[in-house]
Amino acid sequence: MAQVLEFKLPDLGEGLTEAEIVRWLVDVGDVVAIDQPVVEVETAKAMVEVPCPYGGVVTARYGEEGTELPVGAPLLTVAVGASSAVDGKEAGPAAEPASASSAQASGESSGNVLVGYGTGAPAARRRRIRPAVPPAAPAAPAERAPAPAAPAAAAYVEPTPAPAAQAAVAGHAGLNGGVAVRDGAIGPVPVISPLVRRLARDNGLDLRQLTGSGPDGLILRADVERAMAAAEAPAVPADAPTITAPTTSAPVATAPAAAAQTGTRGERIPLRGVRGAVADKLSRSRREIPEATCWVDADATELMAARAAMNAAGGPKISLIALLARICTAALARHPELNSTVDMEAREIVRLPEVHLGFAAQTERGLVVPVVRDAQSRSAESLSAEFARLTEVARQGALTPADLTGGTFTLNNYGVFGVDGSTPIINHPEAAMLGVGRIVPKPWVHEGELAVRQVVQLSLTFDHRVCDGGTAGGFLRYVADCVEHPSVLLRTL
């Protein structure tokens, strides 16, 4: 007898509540092994492959590529014990979806875990099961009857999705004429984003009563917010006097209607994944942190000469950002106020003992900030190697949530974009960020004479709650002195 198990999107850690399906790695009818990756998802922090804790035949998938699912929503169902149909043997009738605990008790599962952890069964070959007779078109989910016993030539019987599974794919099914389940009611709901569903649910709105302004009637967050505003508008008393406006030859559109029409003409790009996480973090930073910026020009000629001498001496190459990182850690040792965070609930400034240095990296997926752990204890050579490793991993889109969290100070080298200066937004919940512009030849007074020198603009954006301008200026001046005279660093080595 085949036992149909439901595999739900597991908790991926770091407080993540949803993930977007990027690519399915298996199809309906495939045989999967325990802990075999079945889908590639993108969270707000990274792209990961999710392994299935069950071994058997894939009988259903929930969500197409590009669909965003909340943690705990069904991903797929697996018929455990039905693989004997591959050899022409008759498979028993599919059972109702079972719990994960019962599967673990029978030794057919390793739990909702990542690859390589908790495995308890040998790997099986992935095989496509091809039914001898093409199956009939399935009925609508609301009208689907219990599945009969599978004939001898059939590979599997697709189970009826549980109510929880129907609710998880409500938005996707609604766009294709399906039936979605929400709060015990059944009806088409053309909405994909779980955030939109949550916003409507929290404000008591029935999504089935709204008309979406997105493609194919898709309900967007703006539609829900307009419905909320309309619900909060004061009602006009029945006995209120009526004021008749002068009649004109052409109808006059109201301002909200005109704004709505204008908003539907442009291209709409969902704020999700990395882009959405960046938007949320930067918006929170600007709301909560009273930031200020100071900057200074510095003569980087001696720093560039010192780097060239290091690399000419042989051994691994030293990168410029590694030298700047070494300068930052030395400056933070002198000004620990800037390596801190603010706990507003306790009304305390928390000074941090280690420097976990984040650095901005532009990738095809957008701006990410990998973190170099314990930068204060690393040499320039070690920093160069770690910067190179994290940059390569970022370009491959393989950064883990641990690689992108826990930073205490950020180094932002925007000079690679060919600009001199910037006033960046602090990477919340950090307290400061050092920005480095491009290094270019400029006229400079050197030893009392005008000369062409390699000049760079340095900027420090800092949280004014943790220190005043004197501390920020002292930090930035020390950094500039080390750039102009690298020998200053010898005192701290």
Image (tube, rainbow, N blue to C red):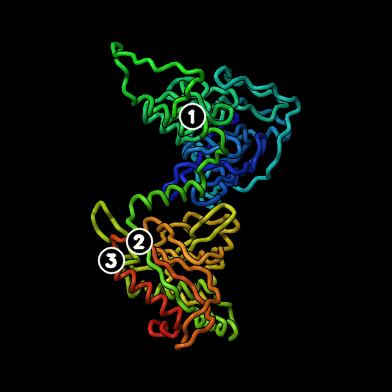
Label 2 with label 1: CB-CB less than 8 Å: no
**Disc 3 from disc 2: Cα separation:** 10 Å
Residue drawn at 67 percent across, 34 percent down: 29
Label 3 with label 2: CB-CB less than 8 Å: no
Residue 193 lies left or right of residue 472; in this view the side is right
Q: Earlier in the sequence, mark 3 or mark 2?
A: 2
Q: Amino acid at mark 3?
A: Asp
Location of residue 38 in the rendering, given as x and y in whole percent from the top left corner = 60, 43
Q: Quadrant of the C terminus?
A: bottom left
Location of residue 445 in the rendering, given as x and y in whole percent from the top left corner = 47, 83
Q: Is residue 291 visible?
A: yes
Q: Amino acid at mark 1?
A: Ala
Residue drawn at 60 percent across, 46 percent down: 36
Residue drawn at 44 percent across, 16 percent down: 247
Residue beneath disc 1: 258
Residue beneath disc 3: 468
